[in-house]
Image (cartoon, coloured by chain):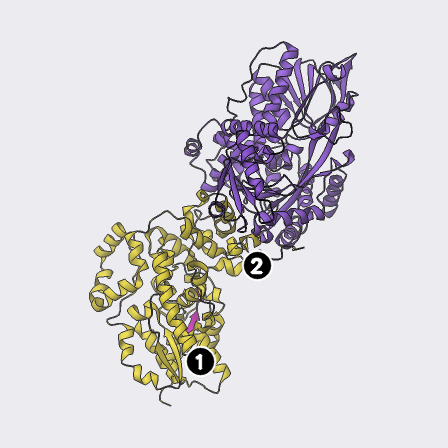
Chain colours: A purple, B yellow
């Protein structure tokens, strides 16, 4: 193993490529700070990529947590403006079922209005007209400015903007050590997972934005941040069941939000504490599936007959207040820890808690603190400057890539916003489809491979939705692996391994809900790859075991 | 726990497992690269259209609604219905005057039959064809079916009392083609049924089945006509206990399946009371003592062509077996493949080339079969085959009628 000291100087190193880390890198870069973002896998692999994709209005928190509610609605309005290509302005309904206390509605509306959230009581009949999938038994409905946000696009866009402003991004680099000089963190030691090289990077400030894994990163500095891993499981339905976000109008509980996102709908979530040893391999249990379906059907009865594509779970980084070691007093609010003040350790900051909705605000607070430490006066511009992809009107973009067939054109604009203009789409080969369910063209895959840091098929899925449709890789995975191989992303042997690994990753999500057509289709997929393509059972099993061990 | 045993999404598109066999069997996708094929246009497209209506692609108009995709599908996805329903729901293209003329077979037929000799001559004239091609976008190479001078219904009026004298009765849904263009087929049917000891009635009110209205986007009118037909069928099947038979495979298919699937017209109570004449006759012959006597002085070598909707109904068997019963008829069964015309589709200038390319393989097989004539249950297949090959084309009922020995 080689060990290299990287001499290039950085002001800040951000650990963690989730929305918060990417947002912090963006904010720093825009303020002229030399920033390096380090992520051990791909961007948005943690909780960022494993949530509802709900653009909270804040209404959910209005009654129980006024502060979070206010943050949500402010950030909601900002994201609509700066990240329009990642956001679907669907609105949301808070439904009261006969079993719910209708008195809660008045309390709810009042709390929303107090937090600055538009909340309009509408007639249940009107609610059903607006959203026909809603339970016809509802006795009350409130309309709020919820929406859907795509976390993969949002994070990617932040990374692109950060890089455009001089930030450096290293994915598949794992921090193994925090370099310490007396009472100061001066850099990080990282393992490059691709080359197995070990390198040192130095900076004045190191930011721990590792989400739940931030617990372990803090440990590297000998610091305890009292985090509580809270697992949240969700189900993805095969198509879009609802076009308006559906919530239950009651105290927040399990499985009471149904979010339409791109081509699908999501029901979630559960909430259960898990030990730290499990956070790298979350499996959805049959009890969680039952709970999600049972509660989900109350919001939209049609879910009982709708095909489920996958189940997955993420881990929320809940933080216990410092003065409460029992961990009972957990907050979902933003936690910014200046370890110089808290622990007497200079040059180290932890940003955690919060939620996807407030990633930008978390980044702003963190960058403000960094600026204070570095004596920089630059102002935050992330609330006003639009993200790459959201800068041009969709109609204008449509006109520029009019040569693409309609469905992949619409889909790629939805995925990349004005960056879709970079898609080459002039030849019939480039217009041909890799992924038929999600309409991902060869041109779009090439764009992702060339410009969006794709190292394997799972990365490609996060950038383009390849393999996210109902076929779950049946038709697209081999095409995509072939393209990656032909564009020299990897050799044929690696392509086969990656293909097997991707298919196993897809199967992991299907296994908890493998019945009916989903099971039938996965059997067919298996037959194609094992029986027709000859992808060896040994390779599939080997990759499957690797997946189980969380490697 | 409810393990979600059933998918009951409208049209069951979720049952698609992307095997793509539908696209392999699609006659249009094979020859027209502008058509995305049934999988993309059907289940895949439906999922996207549920996300947003602007995923509706006008290229769905290239679908000929042959339903061969549905026959091929191992997952019971109603692919053709999904595509047609999407066209009905989303297409923003207004039907043209041309589409109106092609779709309103009833109206145009009523106007044309009294003037049949003039209309037929005029429609055959080169300058008229040029104008139709240029102004109406009806392809000049297309040969029009001739109109009859006097309708089948008017001929039938004179037969009524004789027909009522039979103890066993059927109601005959003759369709526009028999009524306005080719009453001879209707007359052949009456002859054959009478030879079997069955009298033929007409329905109280018969309207065009509406297939051309559906494919040209006149849905309201199609629904109106469907209601009239289902009411009349109900009177016959339920009130009088008289089954309904038809000679046109497409009319039969439309009444049985397209009414509930595309027009939302319920027909569950009478659906099984509507069938094809050949099936009715086959069953009658196999279940009773009745036998038909055939001529010994005439020999025929014929080729049977399976129309797409016949394939979908699964009833080509009955027509084929019936032809095999005729001693002096030598039968060649052609490969089941689309002839390309698909009703009014092939008449449209923009579809002419696609239409002829789809039929190419069939035409070649017909020419090589060395037969006296082609036999099929569909009138538009007949026009296409007669225009595109050197053979004329007959309905199996007409072959039966020709071969019947009426003297003994």
State whether discs 1 and 2 lie on one chain.
yes
The reply, left or right, for residue B51 in relation to residue B375 is: right
Q: What residue appears at the point 56 percent right and 49 percent down from the top-left corner?
A: A300
Q: Is residue A165 visible?
A: yes
Marks 2 and 1: in contact by CB < 8 Å? no
Q: Residue furthest top?
A: A375
Q: Residue at x 38, y 69 (%)?
A: B231
- Check residue B326 in the rendering and tell me which mark sits there, or answer none: 1
For the residue pair B82 and B248, the one nearer the viewer reads as B82
Magenta stretch: give its range. B301-307
* Secondary structure at numbered mark 2: loop
Residue A133, compared with residue B264, is above or below; it is above
Q: Which subunit holds the residue at mark 2? A: B
The residue at which mark 2 appears reads as B74
- Vertical relation: B260 (above or below) A135: below
Chain of the residue displaying label 1 = B
Q: Quadrant of residue A544?
A: top right
Of residues A270 and A184, the one nearer the viewer is A270
Q: Secondary structure at mark 1?
A: loop
Q: Quadrant of the N terminus of chain A?
A: top right
Residue B386, percent from left and from top: 35, 65
Residue B158 relative to residue B39: left or right: left
Q: Earlier in the sequence, mark 1 or mark 2?
A: 2
Spot the residue most to the front. Answer: A103
The total number of labels drawn is 2
> What is the x, y in percent for residue B76?
55, 59
Q: Quadrant of the C terminus of chain A?
A: top right
Viewer-nearest residue: A487 or B378: B378
């Amino acid at each position: 193993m080689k060990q290299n000291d990287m001499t290039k100087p950085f002001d800040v190193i951000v650990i963690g490529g989730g929305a918060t880390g990417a947002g912090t890198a963006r904010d720093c870069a825009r303020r002229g700070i030399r920033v390096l973002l380090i992520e051990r896998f791909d961007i948005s692999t943690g909780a960022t990529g494993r949530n509802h994709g709900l653009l909270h209005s804040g209404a959910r928190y209005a009654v129980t947590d006024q502060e979070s509610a206010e943050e949500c609605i402010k950030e909601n309005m900002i994201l609509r403006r700066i990240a329009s290509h990642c956001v679907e302005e669907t609105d949301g309904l808070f439904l009261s079922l006969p079993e719910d206390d209708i008195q809660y509605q008045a309390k709810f509306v009042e709390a929303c209005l107090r937090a600055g959230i538009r909340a309009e009581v509408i007639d249940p009949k009107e609610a059903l007209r607006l959203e026909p999938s809603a339970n016809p038994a509802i006795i009350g409905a409130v309309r709020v400015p919820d929406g859907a946000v795509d976390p993969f696009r949002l994070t990617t866009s932040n990374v692109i903007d950060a890089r455009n402003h001089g930030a450096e991004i290293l994915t598949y680099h794992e921090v193994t050590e925090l370099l310490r000089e007396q009472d100061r963190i001066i850099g990080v030691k990282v393992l490059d997972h691709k080359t197995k090289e070990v390198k040192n990077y130095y900076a004045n400030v190191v930011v721990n934005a590792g989400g739940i894994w931030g617990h372990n990163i803090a440990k590297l500095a000998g610091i305890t941040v009292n985090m509580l891993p809270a697992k949240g499981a969700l189900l993805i339905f095969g198509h879009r069941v609802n076009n308006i976000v559906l919530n239950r109008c009651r105290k927040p509980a399990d499985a009471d939000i149904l979010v339409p996102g791109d081509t699908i709908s999501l029901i979630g979530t559960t909430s259960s504490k898990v030990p730290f040893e499990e956070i790298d391999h979350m499996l959805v249990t049959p009890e969680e599936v039952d709970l999600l379906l049972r509660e989900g059907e109350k919001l939209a009865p049609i879910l009982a007959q709708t095909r489920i594509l996958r189940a997955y779970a993420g881990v929320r980084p809940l933080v216990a207040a410092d003065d409460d070691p029992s961990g009972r007093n957990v907050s979902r609010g933003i936690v910014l820890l200046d370890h110089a003040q808290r622990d007497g350790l200079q040059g180290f900051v932890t940003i955690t808690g919060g939620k996807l909705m407030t990633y930008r605000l978390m980044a702003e607070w963190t960058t403000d603190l960094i600026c204070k430490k570095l004596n920089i006066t630059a102002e935050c511009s992330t609330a006003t400057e639009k993200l790459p992809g959201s800068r041009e009107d969709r109609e204008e973009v449509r006109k520029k890539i009019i040569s693409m067939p309609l469905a992949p054109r619409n889909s790629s604009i939805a995925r990349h916003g004005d960056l879709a203009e970079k898609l080459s789409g002039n030849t019939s080969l480039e217009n041909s489809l890799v992924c038929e369910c999600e309409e991902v063209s060869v041109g779009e895959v090439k764009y992702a491979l060339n410009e969006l840091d794709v190292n394997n098929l799972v990365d490609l899925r996060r950038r383009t939705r390849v393999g996210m449709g109902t076929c779950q890789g049946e038709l697209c995975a081999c095409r995509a692996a072939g393209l990656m191989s032909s564009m020299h992303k990897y050799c044929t042997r690696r392509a086969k391994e990656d293909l097997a690994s991707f298919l196993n990753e897809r199967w992991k999500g299907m296994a908890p809900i493998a019945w009916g057509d989903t099971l039938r289709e996965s059997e067919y997929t298996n037959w194609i790859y094992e029986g027709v393509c000859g992808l060896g059972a040994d390779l599939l099993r080997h990759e499957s075991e690797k997946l189980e061990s969380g490697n | 726990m409810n393990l979600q045993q059933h998918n009951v999404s409208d049209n069951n598109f979720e049952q698609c497992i992307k095997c793509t066999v539908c696209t392999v069997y699609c006659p249009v996708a094979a020859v027209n690269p502008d058509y995305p094929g049934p999988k993309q246009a059907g289940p895949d497209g439906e999922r996207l259209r549920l996300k947003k209506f602007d995923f509706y692609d006008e290229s769905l108009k290239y679908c000929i609604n042959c339903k061969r995709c549905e026959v091929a599908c191992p997952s019971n996805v109603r692919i053709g219905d999904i595509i047609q329903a999407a066209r009905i729901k989303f297409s923003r293209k207004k039907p043209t005057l041309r589409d109106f003329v092609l779709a309103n077979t009833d109206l145009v037929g009523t106007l044309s039959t009294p003037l049949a000799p003039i209309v037929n001559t005029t429609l055959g004239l080169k300058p008229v064809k040029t104008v139709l091609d240029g102004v109406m976008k009806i392809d000049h190479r297309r040969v029009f079916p001739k109109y009859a001078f006097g309708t089948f219904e008017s001929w039938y009026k004179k037969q009524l009392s004789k027909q009522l004298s039979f103890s066993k009765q059927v109601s005959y849904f003759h369709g526009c083609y028999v009524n306005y263009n080719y009453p001879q087929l209707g007359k052949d049917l009456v002859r054959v049924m009478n030879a079997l000891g069955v009298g033929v009635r007409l329905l109280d009110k018969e309207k065009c089945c509406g297939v051309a209205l559906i494919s040209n986007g006149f849905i309201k009118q199609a629904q109106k006509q469907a209601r009239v037909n289902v009411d009349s069928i109900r009177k016959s099947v339920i009130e009088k206990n008289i089954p309904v038979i038809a000679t046109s495979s497409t009319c039969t298919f439309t009444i049985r399946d397209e009414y509930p699937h595309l027009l939302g017209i319920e027909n569950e109570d009478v659906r099984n009371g509507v069938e094809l004449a050949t099936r009715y006759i086959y069953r009658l012959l196999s279940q009773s003592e009745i036998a038909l006597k055939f001529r010994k002085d005439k020999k025929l070598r014929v080729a049977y062509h399976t129309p797409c909707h016949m394939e979908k109904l699964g009833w080509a068997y009955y027509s084929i077996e019936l032809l095999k019963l005729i001693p002096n008829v030598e039968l060649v069964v052609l490969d089941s493949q689309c002839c390309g015309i698909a009703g009014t589709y092939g008449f449209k200038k923009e579809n002419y080339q696609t239409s002829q390319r789809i039929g190419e393989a069939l035409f070649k097989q017909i020419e090589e079969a060395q037969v006296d004539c082609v036999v099929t249950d569909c009138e538009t297949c007949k026009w296409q085959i007669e225009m595109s090959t050197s053979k004329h084309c007959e309905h199996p009922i007409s072959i039966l009628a020709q071969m019947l020995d009426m003297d003994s």
